[in-house]
Image (cartoon, grey):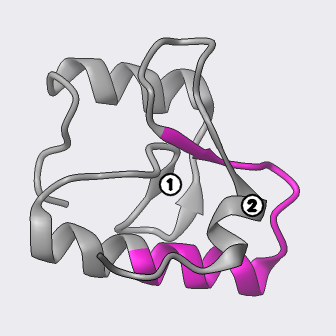
Amino acid sequence: MRDIPDYFWEWTEIDFEHNTGERLVKPDVPPDILKKLIEDEKSEYELTARRTIINIDLATGQIIPIDEAVKRYFETEGGYEHE
């Protein structure tokens, strides 16, 4: 099992509101932490083809609105097309 850094737990939260069960980056995440989260997410996606944090766009490195993230999540049946 891989070690998950503390910043992951501190700056993401589970999406219970939309019933995805996936994690969302908190809107006030510092830029340096966001960069680490994006790098981690890209690396994990390359290994597993699964997303953990759904409200970041891996191509642009930006936080996307939660409604858009949830829409993308459910359109791909809980996954994402390769970005």
| In the rendered image, the vertical position of residue 66 relative to residue 11, given as above or below | above
Instruction: List x then y, in percent, for residue 6.
Output: 69, 76
Front residue of 47/1: it is 1
Say which residue label 1 marks: 56
| Mark 1 neighbour density, 10 Å: few (under 14) some (14–19) many (20 or more) | many
Image coordinates of residue 51 in percent, x first then y, are 29, 52
Q: Is residue 13 left or right of residue 37?
A: right
Instruction: State the image coordinates of residue 17 (x, y, percent, origin top left).
Output: 63, 12
- Residue at the far top in the pictured view: 18
In this view, the residue farthest toward the front is 1
Out of 52 and 38, give the one closest to the viewer. Answer: 52
Question: Residue at point 44% right, 36% down?
Answer: 22
Q: Quadrant of the C terminus?
A: bottom left
Q: Measuring 12% from the left and 75% from the top, which residue is drawn there?
A: 47
Kind of residue at disc 2: Trp
| Image quarter (top left, top right, bottom left or bottom right) of the N terminus | bottom left
Q: Amino acid at mark 1?
A: Ile
Mark 2 touches mark 1? (CB < 8 Å): no
Q: Which residues are magenta?
A: 23-40
Say whether residue 36 is magenta: yes
The residue at which mark 2 appears reads as: 11
